[in-house]
């Protein structure tokens, strides 16, 4: 796999497919990364009710499988957004705690309107960026301007078709995570022999 296909960034935003397809791919990535021995934290989005997917949204923790409902019942006649900010806040806090406890890669369901306004998972994104952790997420084309302001030069967009390629996620994680381990090990060795 060539350098250009993997890219230089620690933050990858997937694009080019329906939200459900991207969330399934993020879940697959979490399993594949964990299978290589990495600690994977974050949340992916799904629906608790396939008959009413927009009315029963939830975030599932990649750490322990906990489910955070992010929908609230506004009644059958309501046309308003049924997003539950409390559920989002609880999910965000859980991800932040995982980052504090120690993780290798953070997968966050998406950067959307809530995050652009400083809510939703914005603090989880910020904590992962501050910790220097690799992040995988999704960003819709409509949110690209806000995403560019938020993530700046630290991020790149990757088409789902590229990310689905054989070995892409492993190659990306090797470049993003292994290099951090190598730096940590070198730093520890230098400290141990009095050079740090």
Image (spheres, rainbow, N blue to C red):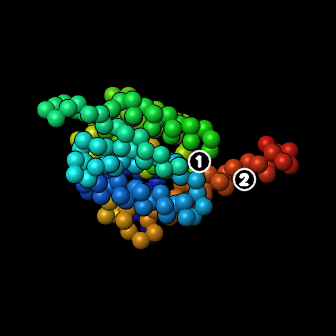
Q: Quadrant of the N terminus?
A: bottom left
Task: Name the residue at the front extreme.
Answer: 76
Q: Nearer the viewer, mark 1 or mark 2?
A: 1
At horizontal 28% and vertical 49% (from top left) the residue drawn is 49
Numbered disc 2: secondary structure: helix
Q: Is residue 81 above or below residue 157?
A: above
Counting from the top left corner in percent of width and height, residue 16 is at 26, 56
Q: Label 1, on which residue? A: 103
Q: Label 2, on which residue? A: 185
At horizontal 30% and vertical 58% (from top left) the residue drawn is 21
Side of 97 relative to 150 (left or right): right
At horizontal 22% and vertical 47% (from top left) the residue drawn is 52
Counting from the top left corner in percent of width and height, residue 63 is at 53, 49
Counting from the top left corner in percent of width and height, residue 157 is at 35, 51
Side of 168 relative to 33 (left or right): left
Is there any visible trace of residue 146 in the rendered image? no
Q: Is residue 34 above or below residue 122?
A: below
Mark 2 crowd level (few <14, some 14–19, many ≥20, 10 Å Cα): few
Q: Nearer the viewer, residue 102 or 173?
A: 102
Is there any visible trace of residue 124 in the rendered image? yes
At horizontal 23% and vertical 30% (from top left) the residue drawn is 74
């Amino acid at each position: 796999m060539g350098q250009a296909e993997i890219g230089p960034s620690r933050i990858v935003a997937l694009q080019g497919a329906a939200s459900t397809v991207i969330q399934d791919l993020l879940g697959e990535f979490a399993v594949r990364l964990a299978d290589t021995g990495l600690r994977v934290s974050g949340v992916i989005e799904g629906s608790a009710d396939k008959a009413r997917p927009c009315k029963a949204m939830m975030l599932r923790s990649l750490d322990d499988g906990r489910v955070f409902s992010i929908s609230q019942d506004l009644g059958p006649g309501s046309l308003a957004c049924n997003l539950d900010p409390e559920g989002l806040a609880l999910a965000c806090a859980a991800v932040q705690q995982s980052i504090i406890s120690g993780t290798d890669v953070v997968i966050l369901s998406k950067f959307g309107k809530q995050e652009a306004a400083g809510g939703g998972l914005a603090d989880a994104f910020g904590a992962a960026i501050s910790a220097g952790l690799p992040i995988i997420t999704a960003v819709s084309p409509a949110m690209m301007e806000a995403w560019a302001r938020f993530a700046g030069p630290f991020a790149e967009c990757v088409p789902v078709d590229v990310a689905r390629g054989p070995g892409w996620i492993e190659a990306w994680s090797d470049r993003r995570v292994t290099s951090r381990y190598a730096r940590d090990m070198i730093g520890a060795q230098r400290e141990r022999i009095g050079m740090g």
